[in-house]
Image (cartoon, coloured by chain):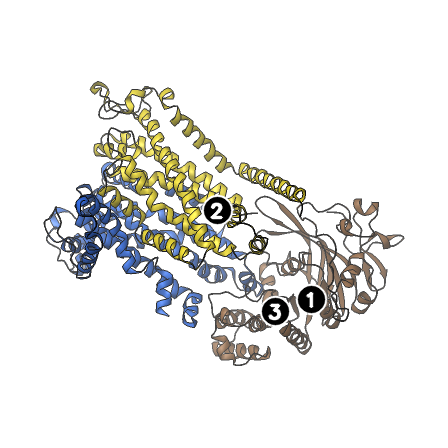
Amino acid sequence: MNLLEVRDLYVKYRSYWYTYHVLDGITLRVSPREKVGLIGESGAGKTTLLKSILQILPPQGRIVRGEVLWKGVDLLKADKGYVMNVRRKGIGMIFQDPLSALNPVFKIKDQLLEVLRYSYDGYSKSELLSLAEELIRSVLLPDPARVLESYPFQLSGGMRQRVVIAMALASAGDLLLADEPTTNLDVTIQDQILRLIDRLVIERGLSMILVSHALGVVAKMTHRVYTMYAGNIVEEAPTPKLFNEPLHPYTKLLIENVPRISSRRLGEGIKGNPPDYRYPPPGCRFHPRCPYAVDICKKVKPFCVKVSRDRRVACHMYSEGLEKVDGDVNAN
Amino acid sequence: MLIFALARVLPGDPIRAAFGPDVPEEVVKRYREMLNLDKPLYLQYFYWLRDVFQFRLGRSLITVRDVSADIAEFFPATLELLLASAVFRIIVAFPLGVLSGRKPGAIMDNIIRVLAYIGICIPTFGWAIILQLIFAYWLGWLPAIGRISEEFTGHVPRITGLMTIDSLVSGNVPAFIDALKHLLIPTVALSIGGAVQEARILRASIVENIGRDYVLNMKSHGIPEKIIYFKYVLRPSLTAVVPVMGLDIASAIGNAFLVESICNWPGMSRYGMIAMLRKDLNAIVGVVLITGIAYIAVNTITDIVLYVIDPRVRLRGREE
Amino acid sequence: MTSRDLSTIARKEREVRLENLKRAWFRFSRNRLAVAGLIILTTVVVMALSAEYVTPYPSHAGLYINFEERYQPPNPKHVLGTDMYGRDVFTRVVFGFRYALMMVGVVLGIVVPAGTVLGLLAGYYKGTLIDHAINGASEVFVAVPPLVLALAICSILEPNVFNALLAITLMWWPWYARMVYSMTSSLRNEPYVWAAKALGMRTVDILFRELLPNMLGPILTKATLDASWVVIIGASISFVGLGAQPPTPDLGTMLSEYCRYLPAYWWMTLGPLLGIIVLVLSFNLIGDGLRDVFAGE
């Protein structure tokens, strides 16, 4: 059975003036102990997807429809207590920016203990404290006592990210959501942090969804990868296959544009910008930037087709003669 | 560290503050002593400054006493009013802000929004007149003017100079209630506009913080909403309101001039007002000087409060 | 770069500005409260300008005595009643708008440009003598509550409208200077300012064509919100008797004359008070609308 399954999820953000159609029918699954990658440009809706799983969208965000199945139970329909329990003991999330993920006016100790109090019920105060110290130690921070007594702004970026990881571990009983855990860090620390996450996930037997721009990291650390573009999953494949033989034009461009040190050339990036979520392009959301776009791409939204046993892609180039799969049915 | 905090907080150092009120004084002197303008300007300023540091502010034309003695007599009443105003703001602004931030767009939020508009639209002296009209003249619940009823004058010993506290300390409960009643109209007039404004600011800050990652992070761990709201949202939001509230209380020192005149509150501001109308120069300069000092004091207190509730201010200062 | 390129760029820039303006207006017009504020203000301005024609008894504005009609409560003939000399309160309030609006116009007309220029200079030459001189001067004024300073200035000079204006103007400029100063000091390190410097643009052009356009939003918002403060402070000064003197139909002066007749003739007080409220409310509604427009989406 899948640990987590997201089916046909639609999310929008509303501001005073506009509605942003951010997630446009997302379908994804994670098996126990599986490490899944999620790649795509910034603004593709990856963070929104992770937050929707936990239903912690900011107030402007709304889940329009869809299902989030956790061990077979739909979290969107489950009662509040069940959801709270999943948040406390099932899923932990590493936020993208370690500075903004920690409350600036509380000590690390206050925040971490608060989290532990609910994830480990029935523990005494001193037990919780030693648990907190243990967690801090497990993310390889020296001098846990001092770290716990600090305020977030007194720690370096790398230390803060380790604290955020420790917090996430506190409630990650089965699944860890890692939202670009290294984007805001020094290059020198990025590798350490990723290795740490990878080790902790394996040690604790967790599943993981790793969101990252760094394709090299995803290639190394994950079993399976989803490519996301403008609120759609456009491709899914086992990691090696996706990187060796990308099918969707967007995935291809993404991989071609990885800057390589050997070639001493920076990636030029993909031409154009992600679409305006207020008025997403009709048909395939990628067609304005797609080098292979033909007429049908502008009119009809491509559905996901199964091109082989373990690969899915949402692109008209591959859809001929194949059955649509999963939930990606209708446009907008 | 202390020097850092002071330099950052204060809009000017005390010497500059003393200089500020002196500007109009100099202008006047220039008019008065048109004939010998070259000599006295700097010297006079220098002498005046020397006197100030010895608490000699010159003789008042009205009371024929030293201005410093007058101010010493009248200042406690003003202080009492300002303290009451600060208390009123806190007990009104915080609950209202917390209430309307909890559910943006709900009925409570809209009521408070309307209140806030009413609050800013009516100037302080307008409030004073309206409150007097309704509660003193029409309903007759509260006295319109003065600080305490005649029957109690002279019966309350002067300990701190704050009538309410003095009567309470000396165990004179009826006097205390009477003093409190007198205090009510000027206090509310002085603070209500600011209080609802501050509630709005607190609300805005809360609404902004609710969507922040550190709140969502807490939420992602299954911490109950109430704890998140009252602890992890409210505390950082307070750091946004406190400076505004401090500034407002500081500017209430100015509005006290009007309220004290309307409500016949025997404080320093009313004394200053009378002095202004009669061109009692020494008194004007003295009152403005003390007002300036009080203004800076309030700003300093604001910073101290901020220093206590916001570790970023506190600990950055130490690193400096 | 040829001159044609430059003119194309300039045209493009104008187009972009026009487009932004249109968008800002669109957002502003969607805000019902702000539009209501604008309508109220426009009405008030028109009424004040044509006070001689729209008010029922223009002669009542100044000195006029008719004891037979004094102390009348609001009625169809006198919508806000009459005062102790039998003057129509409504007429006087409309004339009062004239003084209040003139005050706003004069004060903001002087203070906004002056404060902006000083703030720009101090911010751009941060750390130099110019910065210290301007900031030092503004600190002197900021060290005392504005109202007290204005009252003190008025009291030492002759109490009249002109000196009240002078006092408010004097105490107000530092707040603009400080706001623009802080914006300038953060913007001066932006790449486009460096670029302009590197291209050898004149300092005047950098200040007014590169920096200033980026601050217009907040300045305009503050000016609108401050307009209401000018109304209040102006009224306060004349209320205590240090500004316009009777029989000038100034809102604050009227209020102080009339509030002596409380509680029996309360409607007299109501008139000027309502006048102040209407003005302050409209400026605040517009100001809030502008703030929302410039705060972005």
Tell me the colour chain C is drawn in.
Answer: yellow
Residue A159 position, x and y percent, is 56, 74
Residue B99 visible from this viewpoint: no
Chain letter, brown in picture = A
In terms of sequence position, does the residue under pointer 3 or pointer 1 come before the other? 3
The chain under label 2 reads C
Q: Nearer the viewer, residue C57 or B115?
A: C57
Front tag of 1 and 2: 2
Q: Secondary structure at mark 3?
A: loop
- In the image as oriented, which residue stretches furthest toward the right? A321
Residue type at mark 2?
Answer: Pro
- Where is residue A239, by image quadrant? bottom right
Inter-mark Cα distance, 3 to 2: 34 Å
Residue A136 position, x and y percent, is 55, 77
Left or right position of C70 against C108 = left
Residue identified by numbered label 3: A185
Residue at 35 percent across and 21 percent down: it is: C52
Determine which of the numbered discs, if any, sits on residue C218 in the image: 2
- In the image as oriented, which residue stretches furthest toward the bottom? A143
Residue identified by numbered label 1: A209
Residue type at mark 3?
Answer: Leu
Front tag of 3 and 1: 3
